[in-house]
Amino acid sequence: MNVLEVAYKKHKIWLNICKSFGLDKFTSEDIVQEMYIKLHHITEKGTDISYKENDINYYYVFKILYTLFLQLKKKQNKVRFADEELLRHVEGPDQMNYKEIEDRFNEEFEKLHWYDQKVFEIVSSGTRISELSRKTTITYISLYNTYNKVKKHLKKKMGL
């Protein structure tokens, strides 16, 4: 008999083991499905995890489930979620008014020469300076210097 068939007959037992780790029904189901994949890979390599004639080594399956659970927890610990309710009520000197910053930026940008504005807009939109140089026949160094001059000017005016 196939090891996966034997393992699947005890599907509810594997789910209960995962729930005992503190997982919900859906996450337990995911972990058990991953366990089946692991069992498939292990048995393809030739490892025998059967116990007696028509049974499976419970301890081996438990270790697989527990390892998958620990891997899931490790991944979850790397991801940090901000509490949206907390973020809505954050006030103080660190809070930024993005509309005000955007208005200041646009005001300073409008003061620039039209050529400087265009070069900055085109390069900032993702066009490479070398590509712009080929299309316009303006030297690379001229475009590079213009872009950097505008960037430094705007940073200075914005206080960055």
Image (cartoon, rainbow, N blue to C red):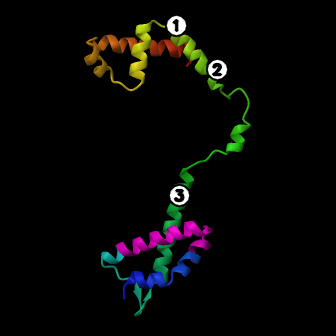
Q: Is residue 129 left or right of residue 108?
A: left
For the magenta stretch, what is the residue range?
17-41
Circle 1 packing at 10 Å, graded few (<14), some (14-19), many (20+), is: few
Q: Residues under labels 3 and 1: Cα distance? A: 51 Å
Q: Which of marks 2 and 3 is in front?
A: 2
- Residue 106 lies, in percent from the top left, at 55, 15
Instruction: Provide the residue designation for mark 1.
Output: 111
Identify the residue at horizontal 64%, vertical 20% (top origin). Answer: 100
Instruction: Provide the residue designation for mark 3.
Output: 74
**100 and 83: which is toward the camera:** 100
Identify the residue at horizontal 33%, vertical 24% (top origin). Answer: 128
Give the residue type that dot 2 points to.
Glu
Q: Who comes first in sequence, dot 3 or dot 1?
A: 3
Q: Is mark 1 on a helix, strand or loop?
A: loop
- Above or below, 60 against 126 in this view is below
Q: What element carries label 3?
A: helix
Give the residue type that dot 3 points to.
Lys
- Residue 84 lies, in percent from the top left, at 67, 43
Q: Residues under labels 1 and 2: Cα distance? A: 17 Å
Q: Who comes first in sequence, dot 2 or dot 3?
A: 3
Q: In this view, does 76 lie to the left or right of 96?
A: left
- Residue 96 lies, in percent from the top left, at 65, 27
Q: Which of marks 3 and 1 is in front?
A: 1
Give the residue type that dot 1 points to.
Lys
Identify the residue at horizontal 40%, vertical 75% (top origin). Answer: 39
- Residue 120 lies, in percent from the top left, at 42, 16
Instruction: Provide the residue designation for mark 2.
Output: 100
Q: Residues under labels 2 and 3: Cα distance? A: 40 Å
Residue 30 is inside the magenta segment: yes
- Above or below, 156 against 29 in this view is above
Identify the residue at horizontal 55%, vertical 80% (top origin). Answer: 12
